[in-house]
Structures are given as C-alpha cells and as structure tokens.
Image (tube, grey):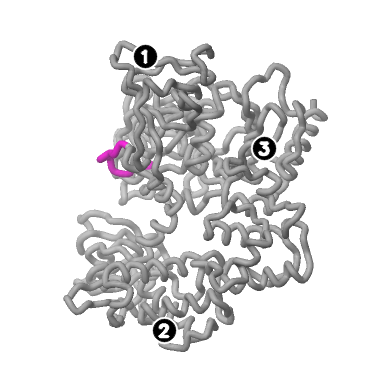
C-alpha cells in the first residue's frame, strides 16, 4: 500500500513539472469523473488533472488552513450540495459574516472558494487574504482566485476525487510562475509552454550571451530583478510573462524572434511596478519614474534615467505624505501608487494643466507608551467614556494636545485619549501634505492634515493599498459577461438540459422558466451552460441572450462587514457546536467555568467537564477586557464562557 502511494506521488510530481501523459495511471478502477484534483499543502498548489490521460487541465496557487485550523489531508469525493448557495456566485459564511464566490464543499465544513469578501461584491475582498495568498491563511477551507474557484464549481462535479496531502518538498520555481497566473489551457497554451519550455525560441534551459543581453534589457525596462546570469531560468520566465501581459499577449514566458524585436525597440513597454527599484538603478524605467515625480512636483532634477539621491529624497516625501513607511525604497506598490497619483491629477486638471504642488509641513510631537500593561484609548478624557482600542507597550503615538492628566493622541488609525503618565517623549516628526490648486479653485491633496486625521481621514496609502490589493478582482468584476435567460413561455414549462447538443442526448436537469444562466459556449443551435451541479446544453430557440458586467449583476447587500470579533456583540443566524476543553491563560490552566455574565468576576453557574458538547450563539468582544467571550447554551442553560475553553469548527473562509 505504501509502495502504491509512493508511486502515485512520484507520478503526480512528474505530471506537475513536465506535463507528461500517464494514461490511466492515476485513475482508480471505475472512476468515471472527467477530472480529479490534487491539493499539495506544502506548496499551496491545487492541480486539476484530466482523468482520460492524466494531463494537467488546470493548476493554481491556493491558501489552506493555518495552525490550529488545518485543512484535513486524505482522499475525498465531492459531495452533493448541502446548501442552495454552494457552487453559486455567492456563498454566505454565516458564522464569520463574510461571503465568497463559487464555494464547493469537499467534506463537512471544508470548501474550495474564492478569497472572502465583506459584502457581495469583489471590491470588498479581504486585503489580508490577498496579501497572504499562496500561504496558509484560512480556517481550513481552500482559498482560490475567483476564476479558479468558478472552474471547480462548474466543472468538477459530485463524485470528483480530491487528494489533499503534504508533499514535503517546496517547489519555489513552480510557485513563482503560479503567482503570476494560473495555468488554464484556455488560450491553447500547453502546460509545457506554461512552464517556459520551447523547442525553437528562447525558453527554459536556454543560455548564453543572447539570454544575458535579454536579461539586461528586461532589467532596464523594469521587469527583471537582480544580477543577470545568462541562464533562462524561472526569474527570466517570470519577467517575460509580465512583459507579455503588459502587451496583451499569451504569457508563456517564451521569447520568440518577433517578441525580441519589440523588446529592443523604442516602443518597448516599460514596467509600472513589477520589481523593487533602489538607489543606483538606471534605464528607461527610472526615466519614467523621474517624469512622474516631476509631474507631482517632488523632483526638480535632470531626467537622466539614474536613480540617485535626489530621486530617493523625492520618493521619501511621497511616502511621508501618503502614510507609507519612509525608506526611499521603490517597491512595486510604491511605484504604482506614484503613477496612480499622476493619473488622478491628470483626470482632475488635464494632462497639460497640472498646477504646481504646494508642500505643507506640520510638526508632530511623538511619544512612546511606557506602562506595565497595554493602555486603553478612550473617546473622551474620562475613564467612563467608550474604549476605542488599545495602545501597546513600546508603541509610538502622536500627541496632538493635552487636557489635564490626559493626552489627545493618534495611534495608528485610532484617535482618542490616554493618561499622560503612560507616555514618554520620543522627539518630533513631520507630516507632509501635497496640495494642488487649479485656477478655478478646484484642489486635490495627497496626504491628510493632523486635524483631518483626528476627524478620521484615511491616508492615501490606505486607500491605494485597498485598490492595489483588489485590482485583479475589480478587473474581473468589470468583465462583460454573456448570459441567457430561459424563456419557455410559461412557469409551468421547464427546459431540458441535455448532456450533448442534441435533442436525443440524455436529460441532465430541467431548468425553470426565467432562470438566468451564464453562457459557457455556443455550438450551432445549442448553448452550453452550467446549472446546479450539471453542465450541459439548452436549445437557443428557448433562450434570450444579453450581456452585462459581472459586478452589475451581483446582488448588493446593506449588511456591514463583520469578522469574528469586529462587533461588540455579534449574534449569529446559526448555532455553532463546540467542545469544552481546558484553557490556558498566562501560562496557567483554567477551569471551563460557565459564568452568568461575560466577566470573570460574575457568578459561576457551573464548571463544565472536558468533552462536554455546547452550542455557541454569540461572540462577544469587550474592548475593556483582555479576553474574548462567547455566549453558549448547555443542556438548556445559557451563560458565558471564555473562548479559549472551547474548541469549535467553523466553516472557515
């Protein structure tokens, strides 16, 4: 049995790397699904294989569960839907108060699904989830990009085998390629081409002076990072893929003769932020950057394509005004933020009419939190006022003013009051605001004044980071999509969904009149669609066709975003089963008491035995408390427990 498992893993890795065909080697006897799925937790990679020949049909990065919320390993078969919103555009994680697209259940509370969103729109995607993509980050589910989650929901039907395992060997080369894009095969690209192999052009394995020259040119254009080595490796493939993407070409990472001509031409694309740029860099990418900083009024030096000290100082002023860390390092996000700021000015004033920048400077008094414990930030200079958050030992805060024994401070995104005795002076810093005012009095600012911050104004960095993080989702949301509506003429008449484009083919389902379906393909008088768990064909004569934006078609919701402890008291639509365990607090074991109130000083109603089964009905977060509480039901008795005394499984985004 072990030898068989070893052989399966070896063959799987061979297929993943070389795209080899292993006719029937990975298929169980009697397995009749079109695809089977492997999830490699070590590499955070999902690979979908064609059952017919073992070839790679699709491959993608994912995020599986974190420590304590591990994704279960083993072999599973996709079950029938337990809820109507599975395998649909939006799935509601009731306990977490978030949504995800195209959720497909694997087993119990573990699903494939897109990154979680706070509302039913892709613009509200969880930024932390996107930033952690490709690393363990979920509550046990397998997070995917939207298109990949949709493919599984529509194509991997009930009964599809899913093998989840730890390969134990990290493949960073493959991970780097999948960070750029998933392999889909939809544009005719073979898996071998996706990996960068070519028999005729420059590709994986090529080497020599021609490759070295190419790397230097890609570096000048801002696509290649590091010292060129003359070897056509994964870093080179990734650079070429980014350039091809900017040109709107299939991004296989292979450099053909025609692509070489474009790369060495005067009209070659210049990166807007693919690699980090530091002092000493030169080339067209620096010239583009100098021009943008000049437009912003931050750089007055020569446009000489050299990233020198003057350029670095201009970048630092931009970072300071925006609310970024001030280090002068041009990360991809900082570069794109600069170009975004220029585009905003051009949109506001016109490309040729951008006014001179006014640099407003404000002095800020800084202090560090000097206390024996974390300090609560209050809404007013009064211990009875609302708690807004906490300042932690050693944190640096901005002191705006004082009121008796209290200091008015800004800590991160929170402004409020704390006792001056817990603060130690830490010098001064400066707040910069870039202000542009047109002849008609219209203005645009980059950065916020201290007064504006006290009123809750967001930094440019916060606004842009959200945009930068969700860029792939917003572009997807704006995609024009073809739809069809079933029009049988009567709600009593359903339309047969056929297994093939023929009226003689098997009937897979009957679709109600008025149902809206996304068009997957059209073949003559038939249209291919996905409905519930089936993919099949409908006759065109009973369909009306239309187009729209995916974002416009999504049902909006007024429900605010809610994470597990975002609200002071969060009452759920469902009850969550939990098991009582012994908790540990400050290094000491504590008994699982059931309290009358969410307070350790309140009356104890009972002490529960380890292993007892309870149901959670509320999550409670008290800013005045160092502990998280839950309200539970136990044998008809309702009370409160510390959440560290409970073990529970949530369908986890």
In this view, the mark in front (2 or 3): 3
Seen in the picture, residue 188 relative to 609 is either above or below; the reply is below
The residue carrying mark 2 is: 299
Q: Which mark is residue 56?
A: 3
Seen in the picture, residue 331 relative to 96 is either above or below; the reply is below
Helix, strand or loop for disc 3: strand
Residue 475 visible within the image: yes
Q: Determine crowd level at label 2: few under 14, some 14-19, many 20+ residues with C-alpha closer than 10 A.
A: many
Instruction: Please provide the residue range marked out in magenta.
Output: 555-564
In this view, the mark in front (2 or 1): 1
In this view, the mark in front (3 or 1): 1
Chief secondary structure of the magenta portion: loop
Q: Which mark is residue 576?
A: none
Give me the residue at 48% from left, 75% from top: 288
557 inside magenta stretch: yes
Q: Is residue 299 left or right of residue 5?
A: left
Seen in the picture, residue 595 relative to 433 is either above or below; the reply is above
């Amino acid at each position: 049995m072990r030898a068989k498992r070893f052989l399966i893993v070896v063959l799987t890795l061979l297929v993943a790397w070389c795209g080899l065909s292993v006719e029937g080697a990975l298929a169980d006897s009697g397995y009749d699904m079109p695809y089977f799925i492997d999830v490699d937790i070590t590499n955070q990679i999902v690979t979908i294989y064609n059952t017919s020949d073992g070839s790679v049909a699709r491959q993608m990065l994912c995020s599986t569960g974190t420590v304590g919320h591990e994704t279960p390993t083993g072999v599973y078969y996709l079950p029938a839907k337990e809820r109507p919103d599975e395998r649909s555009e939006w799935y509601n994680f009731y306990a977490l108060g978030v949504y995800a697209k195209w959720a497909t259940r694997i087993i119990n509370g573990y699903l494939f699904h897109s990154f979680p969103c706070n509302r039913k729109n892709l613009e509200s995607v969880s930024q932390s989830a996107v930033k952690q993509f490709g690393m363990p980050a979920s509550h046990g589910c397998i997070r995917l990009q939207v298109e990949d989650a949709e493919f599984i929901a529509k194509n991997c039907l009930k009964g599809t085998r899913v093998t989840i395992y730890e390969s134990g060997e990290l493949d960073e080369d493959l991970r780097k390629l999948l960070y750029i894009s998933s392999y889909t095969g939809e544009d005719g690209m073979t898996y071998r081409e996706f990996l960068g192999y070519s028999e005729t052009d420059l590709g994986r394995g090529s080497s020599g002076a021609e490759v070295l020259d190419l790397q230097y040119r890609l570096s000048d254009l801002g696509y290649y990072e590091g010292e060129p080595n003359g070897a056509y490796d994964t870093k080179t493939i990734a650079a070429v893929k980014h350039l091809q993407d900017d040109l709107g070409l299939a991004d296989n990472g292979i450099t053909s003769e025609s692509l070489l001509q474009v790369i060495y031409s005067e009209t070659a694309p210049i990166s807007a932020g693919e690699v980090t740029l530091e002092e000493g860099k030169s080339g067209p990418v620096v010239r583009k950057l100098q021009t943008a900083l000049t437009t912003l009024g931050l750089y007055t030096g020569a446009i000489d394509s050299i990233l020198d000290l003057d350029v670095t100082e201009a970048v630092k002023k931009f970072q300071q005004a925006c609310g970024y860390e001030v280090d002068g390092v041009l990360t991809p996000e900082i570069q794109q933020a600069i170009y975004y700021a220029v585009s905003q000015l051009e949109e506001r004033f016109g490309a040729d009419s951008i006014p001179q920048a006014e640099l407003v400077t404000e002095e800020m008094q800084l202090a560090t939190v000097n206390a024996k414990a974390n300090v609560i930030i209050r809404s007013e200079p009064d211990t009875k006022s609302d708690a807004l958050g906490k300042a932690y030992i050693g944190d640096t805060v901005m002191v705006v003013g004082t009121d008796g024994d209290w200091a008015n401070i800004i800590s991160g995104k929170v402004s409020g009051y704390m006792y001056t005795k817990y603060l130690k002076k830490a010098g001064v810093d400066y707040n910069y605001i870039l202000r542009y005012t047109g002849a008609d009095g219209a203005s645009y600012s980059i950065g916020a004044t201290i007064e504006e911050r006290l009123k809750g104004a967001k930094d440019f960095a916060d606004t842009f980071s959200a945009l930068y993080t969700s860029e792939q989702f917003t572009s997807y949301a704006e995609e024009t999509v073809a739809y069809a509506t079933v029009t049988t003429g009567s709600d009593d008449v359903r339309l047969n969904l056929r297994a093939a484009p023929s009226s003689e083919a098997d009937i897979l389902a009957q679709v109600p009149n008025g149902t809206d379906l996304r068009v997957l393909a059209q073949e003559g008088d038939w249209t291919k669609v996905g409905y519930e768990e089936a993919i099949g064909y409908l006759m065109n004569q009973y369909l009306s066709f239309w187009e729209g934006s995916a974002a416009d078609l999504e049902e909006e919701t007024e429900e605010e975003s809610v994470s597990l402890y975002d609200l002071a008291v969060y009452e759920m639509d469902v009850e969550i089963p939990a098991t009582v365990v012994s908790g540990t607090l400050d290094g000491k074991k504590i008994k699982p008491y059931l309290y009358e109130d969410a307070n350790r000083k309140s009356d104890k109603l009972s002490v529960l035995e380890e292993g007892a089964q309870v149901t959670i009905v509320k999550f409670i977060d008290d800013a005045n408390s160092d502990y998280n509480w839950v309200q539970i039901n136990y044998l008809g008795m309702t009370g409160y427990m510390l959440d560290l005394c409970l073990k529970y499984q949530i369908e986890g985004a």
